[in-house]
Image (spheres, helix red, strand yellow):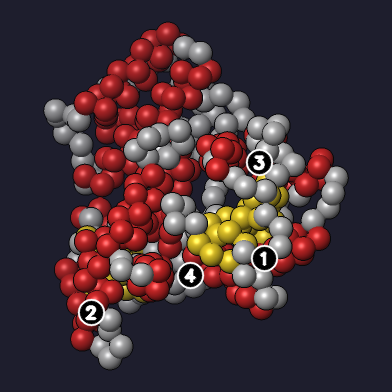
């Protein structure tokens, strides 16, 4: 296979992993396999035979490979530079799709995970009768990844907003409920698990090397939230957790900085966390929290025809401050976009809008 075909094959494998986890535990697949899963298994078997490697004999075996074998393993044939070579599609502790998996399952896919999130928000906007209704509904999703039944009887509960967003919530999947208990990370507030899918024994556990949360990069040592009656809760759909709720901290900090400095903005409805600046200069601001810089650059290649003026990509400080992340992102941008796409953290956002450098080589790597 060519590099392009191998890239597509690994993207499809990521889509299989992501879809499989929505159906049930990644450990419990049985025949007959869904056609995409069977096709992914067949492709890996053929590649293994060509390399003289012993192939996996089942979809659960292939998914276990996705936990143990990184993207750089030769059996996957991932083109060099597309992903961090040590990344896996299945998290080794949580045995759930990784953020890399969800990002890859959205890469050049017409019906990927991120694309689903955008489609859901477009439909939500259609149901709202005003921009203010949409803003409040979207804000509700960000603030309420988990909704408990008792929340609906609290003072301040907005029934009209809940009526608009109710279909964006589902019961927690069986794979996230262990011995009748459901965990949330104390930092990102997204679902969490103990390694080995163990049940919490003595109250809420503390985040550490043998715990998993959907944010993946949260600090250790913070106590998790333990929900003992998960049958009473509803969970925001995964695509919105990953591509709306997770970047919301970056978006909130960035918008606060713009407001504090008198920079006016308006949302871009067809995007998840993107805004046009309405003052002097043609800028758009895009808030992300991503793991793989090359895949993020690919997102802007897709947007090339719709970008007006300069686009400022705002990331968490840990990514914006990483020379490796910035370099990989800049190198993967099409040449025509390098002078027009700037990357920064929230602390540097206003300066980059008002006083970005004029040297195009410096801009594309900043």
Helix, strand, or loop for circle 2? helix
Question: Please, what secondary structure does the residue beneath circle 3 have?
Answer: helix
CA–CA distance in space, label 2 to label 1:
36 Å
Image position, residue 273 (x, y; %)? 50, 58
To which residue does mark 1 refer? 279
Badges 1 and 3: C-beta atoms under 8 Å apart? no
Which comes sooner in the sequence, label 2 or label 1? 2
Q: Residue furthest bottom?
A: 155
Instruction: Specify which label sits upstream in the sequence, 3 or 2.
Output: 2
Which label number is shown at residue 329?
A: 3
The reply to whether residue 239 is visible in this rendering is: no
Q: Nearer the viewer, mark 3 or mark 4?
A: 3
Q: Is residue 145 visible?
A: yes
Residue that appears at 38% across and 10% down: 49
Q: Label 1, secondary structure: give it.
A: loop
The residue lying at 26 percent from left, 47 percent from top is 22
Residue 144 position in % (x across, y down): 35, 72
Q: Quadrant of residue 225?
A: bottom left
Q: Say which of marks 1 and 3 sits in front.
A: 1
Residue occupied by mark 4: 187
Image vertical order of residue 277 relative to residue 103, above or below: below
Mark 3 nearby-residue class (10 Å; few <14, some 14–19, many ≥20): many
């Amino acid at each position: 296979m060519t590099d392009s075909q191998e890239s597509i094959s690994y993207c499809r494998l990521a889509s299989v992993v992501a879809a499989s986890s929505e159906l049930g535990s990644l450990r419990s697949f049985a025949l007959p396999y869904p056609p995409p899963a069977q096709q992914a298994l067949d492709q890996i078997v053929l590649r293994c035979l060509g390399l003289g490697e012993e192939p996996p004999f089942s979809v659960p075996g292939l998914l276990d490979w996705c936990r143990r074998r990184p993207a750089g393993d030769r059996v996957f044939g991932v083109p060099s530079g597309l992903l961090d070579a040590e990344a896996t599609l299945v998290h080794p502790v949580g045995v759930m799709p990784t953020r890399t998996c969800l990002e890859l399952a959205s890469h050049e896919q017409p019906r990927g995970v991120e694309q689903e999130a955008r489609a859901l928000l477009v439909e939500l906007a259609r149901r709202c009768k005003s921009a203010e209704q949409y803003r409040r509904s979207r804000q509700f999703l960000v603030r309420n990844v988990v909704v408990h039944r008792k929340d609906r009887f609290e003072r301040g509960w907005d029934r009209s907003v809940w009526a608009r967003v109710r279909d964006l919530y589902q019961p927690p999947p069986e794979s996230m409920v262990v011995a009748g208990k459901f965990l949330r990370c104390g930092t990102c507030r997204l679902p969490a698990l103990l390694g080995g899918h163990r049940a919490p024994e003595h109250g809420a556990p503390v985040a550490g090397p043998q715990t998993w949360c959907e944010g993946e990069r949260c600090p250790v040592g913070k106590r998790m939230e333990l929900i003992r009656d998960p049958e009473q809760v509803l969970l925001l759909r995964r695509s919105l957790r990953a591509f709306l709720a997770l970047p919301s901290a970056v978006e909130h900090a960035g918008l606060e900085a713009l407001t504090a400095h008198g920079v006016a903005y308006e949302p871009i409805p067809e995007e998840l966390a993107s805004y046009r600046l309405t003052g002097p200069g043609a800028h758009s601001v895009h808030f992300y929290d991503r793991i793989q810089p090359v895949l993020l650059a690919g997102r802007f290649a897709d947007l090339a025809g719709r970008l007006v003026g300069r686009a400022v990509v705002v990331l968490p400080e840990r990514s914006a401050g990483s020379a490796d992340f910035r370099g990989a992102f800049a190198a993967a941008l099409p040449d025509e976009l390098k002078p027009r796409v700037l990357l920064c953290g929230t602390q540097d956002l206003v300066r980059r809008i008002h006083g970005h450098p004029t040297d195009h080589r410096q801009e594309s790597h900043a």
